[in-house]
Amino acid sequence: MIRYALVCDEGHEFESWFRDADAYEAQAARGLVSCARCGSTRVAKAIMAPAVARRDNAAPARPAATPTAPEPVALIDETQRELRGAIRALRARIEANTEDLGPRFPEEARRIHDGEAPQRSIRGEASLDDARALIEEGIEILPIPSLPDERN
Ligand SMILES: [Zn+2]
């Protein structure tokens, strides 16, 4: 079973379970997937959150959780301050040593990969689709770790 975050053409977000990805595609194509709130059959998988390098102060609206490739996550006990400190330090180091390109990140990452832009470390924002496309193109990118209480 696979759970998808879905959104209808009225903007209602809801979740639904399917046997697998093909089952979702087949049911959606036949109009069998309908909004839990308004019944609309014009539904799509919800937009995913920028997954790679989100600036804390950019505060993008948080879309529904990713319906596909799960990301590694950890539940950190509040007492594990050392670990939280390490995550903060790692992120500070990334931020201090990279150029922030914001939403231009995927484009510039490709240009660097193709030798059209100077080789350097950059960070920015990428949707999960962007991130997956970059990885498939052989461009190594890295999600920047964040702590739940720092996301707003
Ligand atoms: Zn709806």
Image (cartoon, helix red, strand yellow):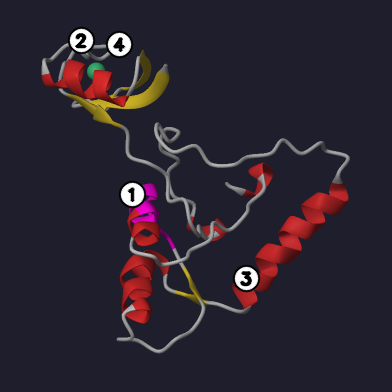
Q: Which mark is residue 94?
A: 3
Residue type for callout 3: Ile
Contact check, label 4 and label 1, Cβ < 8 Å:
no
Whole-angstrom CA distance, mark 4 to mark 1, is 26 Å
Magenta residue span:
125-132
Q: Is residue 106 magenta?
A: no
Q: Residues within 10 Å of mark 4 (few under 14, many from 20)?
A: some
Residue 42 location in percent, x, y? 15, 22
| Mark nearer the N terminus (3 vs 1) | 3
Whole-angstrom CA distance, mark 3 to mark 1, is 22 Å
Front of the two marks 3 and 2 = 3
Residue that label 4 marks: 36
Residue that label 2 marks: 39
Looking at this view, name the residue that lies furthest to the left: 30
Mark 4 C-beta closer than 8 Å to ligand 1: yes
Quadrant containing ligand 1: top left
The residue closer to the viewer here, 81 or 58, is 81
